[in-house]
Image: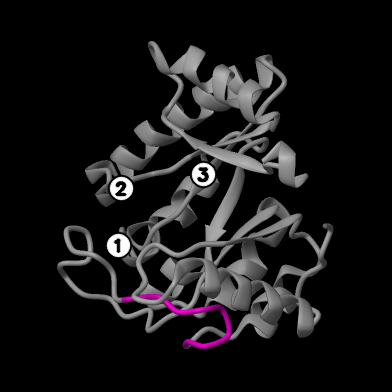
């Protein structure tokens, strides 16, 4: 990374308990970044009840406190279940948002938002002030019951699928610090797809090239 002049904006990590506490600090030091994100995989069954979400909020708040004490920031990454599940008419992140430390930020995965049945731009607009990072990926974005155990449908270069990225970027309102191109699963050359994604975002003035 250093040889190519690339900066790491954030790192996914485990929740900082037990030996994972030192591991979080080692990751932050190795990659010289301050934003550490709980990857959130696989689905935690506690997202299915209000009491379970309260338990998770307590865990996330303790994680954020540990990060803050060490000069770091703690964030959350979503998949589809945090928005697809319903508890008394609300989706889990609606409940969670009111329970977590205000220092906790969101890394919104725009693809999983669409898989959950939402317009990603609508959700990004609501969470924009707390979401400095966006996961940017494109493809069919269809939900299937086996999604958690099977590979997702092949993803494509950004701008070649079903996502409306101009609307997503507009909804973010300038709050986005980093747009992270991601390919969970694809049948094309991944590096070519990343390059095409990069060019799409730059050429359409949806992102800035800092390199």
CA gap, disc 3 and disc 1: 17 Å
The range drawn in magenta is 154-161
* Circle 2: element type: helix
Which residue, as the protein is rendered here, is positioned at the far front? 3
130 or 207: nearer the viewer? 207
Q: Is residue 157 magenta?
A: yes
Q: Is residue 29 magenta?
A: no
1 or 48: nearer the viewer? 1
Which circle's residue, 3 or 1, is located before the other in the chain? Answer: 3
Which circle's residue, 1 or 2, is located before the other in the chain? Answer: 2
Pointer 1 with pointer 2, Cβ within 8 A? yes
CA gap, disc 1 and disc 2: 8 Å
Q: Which residue is mark 2?
A: 47
x and y, in percent, of residue 80 in the image: 36, 63
Q: Residue at x 28, y 76 (%)?
A: 143
x and y, in percent, of residue 200 in the image: 68, 81
Rendered image quadrant of residue 14: top left
From this view, report whether residue 177 is shown above or below residue 98: below
- Residue 6: tell me if it is visible: no
Q: Which residue is mark 3?
A: 76
């Amino acid at each position: 990374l250093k040889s190519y002049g690339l900066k790491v904006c954030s790192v996914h990590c485990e929740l900082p308990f037990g030996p994972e506490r030192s591991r979080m600090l080692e990751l932050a030091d190795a990659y010289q970044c301050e934003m550490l994100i709980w990857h959130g995989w696989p689905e935690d069954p506690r997202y299915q009840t209000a009491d379970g979400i309260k338990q998770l909020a307590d865990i996330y708040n303790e994680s954020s406190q540990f990060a803050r004490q060490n000069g770091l920031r703690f964030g959350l990454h979503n998949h589809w279940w945090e928005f697809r599940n319903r508890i008394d008419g609300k989706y889990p992140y609606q409940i969670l948002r009111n329970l977590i430390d205000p220092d906790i930020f969101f890394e919104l995965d725009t693809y999983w938002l669409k898989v959950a049945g939402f317009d990603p731009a609508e959700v990004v607009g609501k969470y924009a002030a707390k979401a400095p990072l966006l996961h940017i990926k494109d493809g069919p974005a269809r939900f299937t019951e086996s999604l958690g155990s099977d590979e997702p449908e092949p993803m494509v270069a950004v701008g070649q699928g079903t996502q409306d990225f101009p609307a997503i970027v507009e909804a973010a309102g300038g709050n986005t610090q980093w747009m992270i191109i991601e390919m969970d699963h694809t049948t094309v050359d991944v590096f070519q797809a990343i390059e095409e994604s990069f060019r799409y975002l730059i050429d359409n003035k949806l992102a800035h090239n800092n390199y």
